[in-house]
Image (cartoon, rainbow, N blue to C red):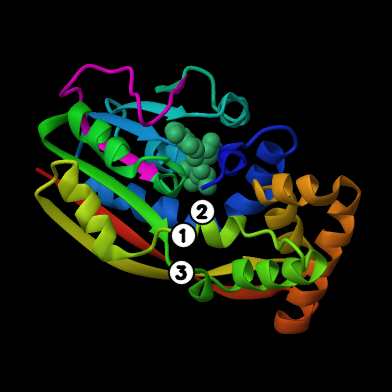
Amino acid sequence: MVADDKVFTGSIPEIYDRLMVPLIFEPYAHDLAERIARAAPHDILETAAGTGVLTRAIAARLPAPTRIVATDLNQAMIDQAAARQPPRDRVTWRQTDALALPFEDRTFDVVVCQFGAMFFPDRVKGYGEARRVLKPEGRFLFNVWDRISENEFADVVTEALAKVFPQDPPQFMARTPHGHHDVGKIREELSAAGFADIAIETVEHRSKAPSPRDVAVAYCQGTPLRNEIMARDAARLDDATKAATEALAHRFGSGPVDGRIRAHVIAATG
Ligand SMILES: C[S@@+](CC[C@H](N)C(=O)[O-])C[C@H]1O[C@@H](n2cnc3c(N)ncnc32)[C@H](O)[C@@H]1O
């Protein structure tokens, strides 16, 4: 991971929330909320909560006494999430690095992290922090994207941008969101962090949008891929988005589009 990969600031949180969340994050938020509900927890910690798609799914699915502490490294993502939060909600938001959790040992029944672990500079440390704040029977639930070739929109956008910047292709999507899909390594890192019982399931969904342009704007402008494009040539953000739109239209058609997304969902205890 390079330093800018974890920077979700400026225009990114609003575009991420409006376009990326419905495109690829919502179905996995419902999946994780169902898994959490089966554990019937009282105290839940969410790390890397972003703009709160999973937080809202948990609050809608779990009964009222459940306490939810939702955290993220980037205050701008929390601000976007908090703006959508109903008054007197039972969610507490707090800016927090998942690698240095400001909570006592053995505080939570569940720690959950949706598509955040790939951004941790030291995953064993991040997993170790989750384990430290879990109660003895507690459960760590998280998901990571499978390889980029199994996630069609991300793959097409990355290939299109390689043609716009052939000398230095933007590799954010392949390097970070889709760079940590090796289930053997995930098991090793969780074991190194002290987890004994690890279950991994691969879950596929369809990603849908009204047009290829919505998908291109979501990826090129609503994720840290924007930072990578701007670092190459700030004046070419629109050109890059247009090239991605055309590549997506060529592959999926110019009307409503529909592509495969695939992720690993991990549950760890012990
Ligand atoms: C792909 S987004 C996922 C957000 C949210 N969970 C969702 O499903 O929409 C990754 C998130 O990880 C956060 N993040 C990156 N590094 C982090 C860290 N060390 N600790 C906590 N959050 C981090 C980013 O700010 C961003 O909100």
Q: Is mark 2 within 8 Å of ligand 1?
A: no
State yes or no: residue 101 in magenta.
yes
Query: Does the rendering let one see residue 197?
Result: yes
The reply to whether the C-beta atoms of the residues labelled 1 and 2 are less than 8 Å apart is yes
| Residue occupying image coordinates x 69% and y 72% | 159
Q: Which mark is residue 87?
A: none
Query: Could you tell me residue 146's position as x and y percent?
Result: 42, 66
State yes or no: residue 219 in magenta.
no
Residue identifier under label 3:
147
What separation in Å lies between label 1 and label 2 (alpha carbons)? 5 Å
Q: Which mark is residue 179?
A: 1
| Residue occupying image coordinates x 28% and y 28% | 66
| Near-viewer residue (208 or 46) | 46
The span picked out in magenta is 94-113
Query: Could you tell me residue 36's position as x and y percent?
Result: 27, 45
Instruction: Please determine whether, in this image, residue 36 is positioned above or below residue 145.
Output: above
What separation in Å lies between label 2 and label 3 (alpha carbons)? 10 Å
Q: Looking at numbered disc 1 in the image, what kind of residue is underneath it? A: Gly
| Near-viewer residue (91 or 217) | 217
Q: Residues within 10 Å of mark 1 (few under 14, many from 20)?
A: some
Q: Which mark is residue 176?
A: 2
